Image (cartoon, rainbow, N blue to C red):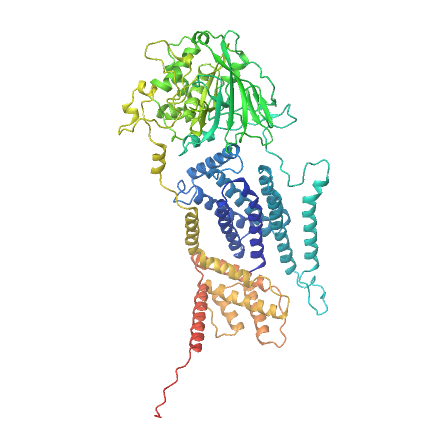
Amino acid sequence: MSGRARLALFAAAATLMASCALLPLVDRPTWLLEAVFLVAAQTGVGAATRRVPLARPLTVAAQALVTLLLLTLVFAHQQAVAGLTPGPEAFRHLTGLLQQGSDDVSRYAIPAPLTDGIRLMLVGGVLVIGLLVDTLAVTFRSAAPAGLPLLALYSVAAGLSDGGGAWLWFLVAAAGYLMLLLAEGRDRLSQWGRVFGGAPRRPGGSSDGAVAPVRTGRRIGAAALGVALFVPLALPAMSGGLLDPAGTGIGRGNGHGGTISAVNPLVSLRDSLNVDQDRQVLSVKTSTNDISDLYLRIVSLDDFDGTTWKPSQRHIVGVPNQFPTPIGLSPDVKRSSVRTTITAADWYAQDWLPMPYPPSSVRISGNWRYEPVGMTVVGDHGQNTRGKSYTVTSVDVQPTAQQLAGAPQAPAALLREYTKVPSALPKVVKRTAEEVTAGATSHYDEAVKLQDYFAVTGGFQYDTQVEVGRGPNAIANFLKQKQGFCVHFSFAMAAMARTLGIPARVAVGFAPGSPQADGSVSVGLKDAHAWPELYFEGVGWTRFEPTPTRGTAPSYTETDTPGSSLPDQVRPSQSTSAAPAVPVSPSESCSAQQRKLEACGSPSAQAAQDNQPQPRPWWVYALWVLGGLAVALVPFVPMLWRVRTRGVRLGGHARTDEGAAAHTLAAWQELTDSAWDFGIPPDESQTPRKAAARIVRLGRLDPVAGAAVHRVADAVEQVLYAPRPRPRAGLAEDVRQVIAAFEGTVSTRTRLRALFVPRSTVRVLWAASAWWASVTARVAAARPTPRRASGQQG
């Protein structure tokens, strides 16, 4: 194995060793096997292009192209052209997976499940780092800067992990980097000959095998590793060493300030609603006898950009003993105090604290912060709800329809912030809102009409299999297709309310759960929910329920018209109805009143999942990629072989008499093979001088190129016939000058044939035939000769 190939192998190993630090972040290590296979393919392409050899930028471009093809095949083969070539659909799919992975990282606790998005981020990140390390250490022969991408890879892992066993992964990553440095050092020293070999250090003349620079590198590496690990521990200004986790909490500061970054908790809703088996998330005990309004709110989404809703970046403070009165709530509105104790499951790690709204106080241990605008509580420095038990005192606000209908205008500042609608929002959203609310006399009437339109009269169906949707047309598509789940309904109603001038936002949390025999309420994954909150001056932020078959419609939205009020009971928080399935479509056989009373069925999520085709294993597509690359390279094999052979023949040689002689013969072989490629077959019966004259005559070479041919022939004669050959310099340049002269004298067709189908490649077949003949001869020689039986009788 050449030094460059060995260095590439160490670069790939260093990348994979550093990527092991990412293993604790997810619950399954299978992604690392994919990364090993893909990094090996990436490294192999780099080694092949460097042996041709290609220019350095072309080598990097080839590796980057193969990396993209591999990622497309593994993660977006269904969207790619012919399953391999990435097109617009494939790029959109990969972008969506990256967004999904980013959302999953912000949602799940460590170790996170290995979702497709997280898998793409892990494997793709390792490939990018591998490409950078290979480029720096091998292509540009500078291994020291290659430590920067390796350090970045480890830093990401250390910043996200909880610190357990981080020292071990740091040692593994550092060992990979040191191996890469030593490999590069040995490769450089090997090119310098025996200058630094040194004298034998043992009496018998043996050497310990390590030259001084290598020994010095080892000592420096060990010292640097010790400094990185142990020196920070001795400094009083630091809380730990390099391996101390920095913490990944949302809030920062001393507990009395800081900010909270925008996250998107909606990414978990669809996954939670589509689980095969519901799992209990929270166990709730409350002082109220009516649990129909016991919504547990996690966070409010108030920033609407036309594509999605998300929480704004807000200032956070320490959790006060008593929360302030909710904004806009008048003393005239009836209210009562409710005390609720909530216990989170051991596996449920949520950064935000699920609470009834509006909360008055919360009692919980740990590092938590309070966001005053949304009245939410969020974990700080990695704090989450896993296994937590806490008590919330909240206000049960009980406005009347008359109070909501007579609500005065909201403050101007609040109107500006919560009625903003981006210009990219399709006009059909506002037009539909105006059509649905035609005849309404107040914002309250408009809100009730919007709620009834989605939940009762509009013909909408609840379906958790519908994608959340992205882009400015997501809401318009939902209004047209009329199928979706709580995200679609809450997004659409809040956006339409804003177009009517009603302040609106979206709340995310849990709908009322299921009562248990011990008096508690069990809240499961399938109770995950989103609903709109509209602001009415004098009442404050008020919940509405536009999603059919989910939660309960608030009592203040029910009219007094006979037959139009909803039953005062909790609607089951299930993605499918308990009614038996019927052959006809629910949209055709279910009336609006039946939908309101839950008499309609919907397709089973499990059945929909079972009908989906099962994806093939990733390694099958990886084999397809390699097979496709092999097939695509077949027409270029002769050209690549000739380019490689020419580079070897005209490359460097040992600075000895034997090396100079071998280089001279190789240059002559390349000159005659190049003439053969351009249509002048070799004549082995002639002397070098006569062969040179023949090449000059048949090739119609000019005097300058002809002189170069004769100089090479003279050097060959020196090697073959002179008692003391005199090495001649510049033979490689002479051969290249002759090749350039050939290209200028032949036709374009001949020149292309010499490039893509060179005649001299027949030597490969001759060599294979000679090898086979030698093998058969050795086998025949090794076969025992049978002894001829004697004719004499005993």
The residue at the point 68 percent across, 67 percent down is: 206
Quadrant for residue 611, please give it. Answer: top left
Place of residue 654 in the rendered image (x, y in percent of width and height, measured from the top left): 62, 65
Q: Is residue 578 above or below residue 134?
A: above
Q: Is residue 149 above or below residue 631?
A: above
Q: Is residue 401 above or below residue 223?
A: above
Place of residue 368 in the rendered image (x, y in percent of width and height, measured from the top left): 59, 26
Quadrant for residue 2, please give it. Answer: bottom right
Place of residue 666 in the rendered image (x, y in percent of width and height, measured from the top left): 55, 67
Quadrant for residue 389, please give it. Answer: top right
426 and 655: which one is in front? 426
Q: Furthest-front residue in view? A: 518
Quarter of the figure with the N terminus: bottom right
Q: Furthest-left residue in view? A: 583
Q: Is residue 747 visible?
A: no
Q: Is residue 276 left or right of residue 185?
A: left
290 and 765: which one is in front? 290
Q: Is residue 179 left or right of residue 548?
A: right
344 and 372: which one is in front? 344
Place of residue 108 in the rendered image (x, y in percent of width and height, measured from the top left): 51, 34
The residue at the point 35 percent across, 38 percent down is: 612
Quarter of the figure with the C terminus: bottom left
Q: Is residue 294 left or right of residue 379?
A: left
